Image (spheres, helix red, strand yellow):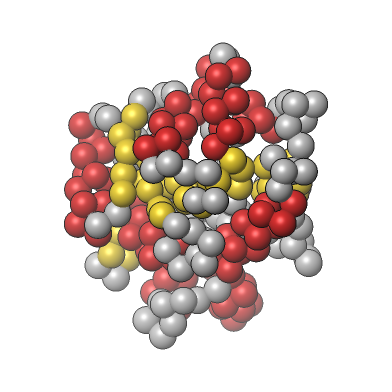
Amino acid sequence: MKVVAIIQARMGSSRLPGKVLKQVLGKELLTYQLERVSRSKYMSDVIVATTNNNRDKEIVSLCKSLDILYYTGPEEDVLKRYYMAAQHVNADVVIRLTGDCPIIDPELIDRITETYLLHNPKYQLVTNTLERTFPRGMDIEVFSLQVLKEAHKQAVSKPDREHVTRYIVNHPESFSLLNVSNSRNDSHYRWTVDTMEDFILIKKIIESLYPQNRNFTMEDTINLLAEYPEWQLINKHVQQKKD
């Protein structure tokens, strides 16, 4: 089976426009994420699913410069964009990631993917987000192209079209779901980038860890924040946007 990671990314964030191309140590956040995702041992390809809006041409240019596959589709109908991107690369299995998770851990990607492959076809979507025990910013979903096709065909409401797996998760009678839990509850950590405060924290983490170890892990980040617990206060007040 061809396993493909698809990262949805766009410049039009309401709270922090252009966030995926914000730079740390002279490198874009999306570039850090692509570096990390590319280390997944199960992945055949990675493709960035962006929009066909003019402002997202910067993301296309970055992908071209990094020799990364990309697909441009509708901004609002994210489900269609995702499905078309998966078809574009002939994916059998999709690893769904979002462009606001620049320090995603490839070892965790492999853990979720391996769980999906081991339990296929019993479970049609395997994720670590149904019950959060991992830091926000370590969000991973794995499912088949067939399941994505079914959601694309069946979902009609605007919220279901705007969120790739919302229809699947909200119809457990049609799709079997499996949640992968952490050995402890680390859900209080927020490592996603949606506001300037989020970016400031991620910038500190990358500047502290990346120069010494480009392959730093989730545990390395937790250990760093144990050294500097005050850093967690930077974005502690930030509320996650509702689906």
Between residue 190 and residue 122, name the one nearer to us: 122
Q: Residue at x 58, y 60 (%)?
A: 109
Between residue 154 and residue 50, name the one nearer to us: 154
Q: Residue at x 53, y 62 (%)?
A: 42
Q: Quadrant of the C terminus?
A: top right
Q: Residue at x 49, y 59 (%)?
A: 43
Q: Is residue 194 visible?
A: no
Q: Is residue 189 left or right of residue 174?
A: left
Q: Residue at x 67, y 48 (%)?
A: 127
Image quadrant assignment for residue 188: bottom right
Q: Is residue 16 left or right of residue 106?
A: left
Q: Is residue 170 visible?
A: yes
Between residue 197 and residue 127, name the one nearer to us: 127
User: Is residue 119 positioned above or below 54 on the image?
Assistant: below
Between residue 112 and residue 99, name the one nearer to us: 112
Residue extending furthest top? Answer: 156
- Residue 140: x and y in percent read 59, 51
- Residue 14: x and y in percent read 40, 34
Q: Is residue 133 left or right of residue 204?
A: right
User: Is residue 192 positioned above or below 175 on the image?
Assistant: below
- Residue 225: x and y in percent read 59, 73
Image quadrant assignment for residue 200: bottom left
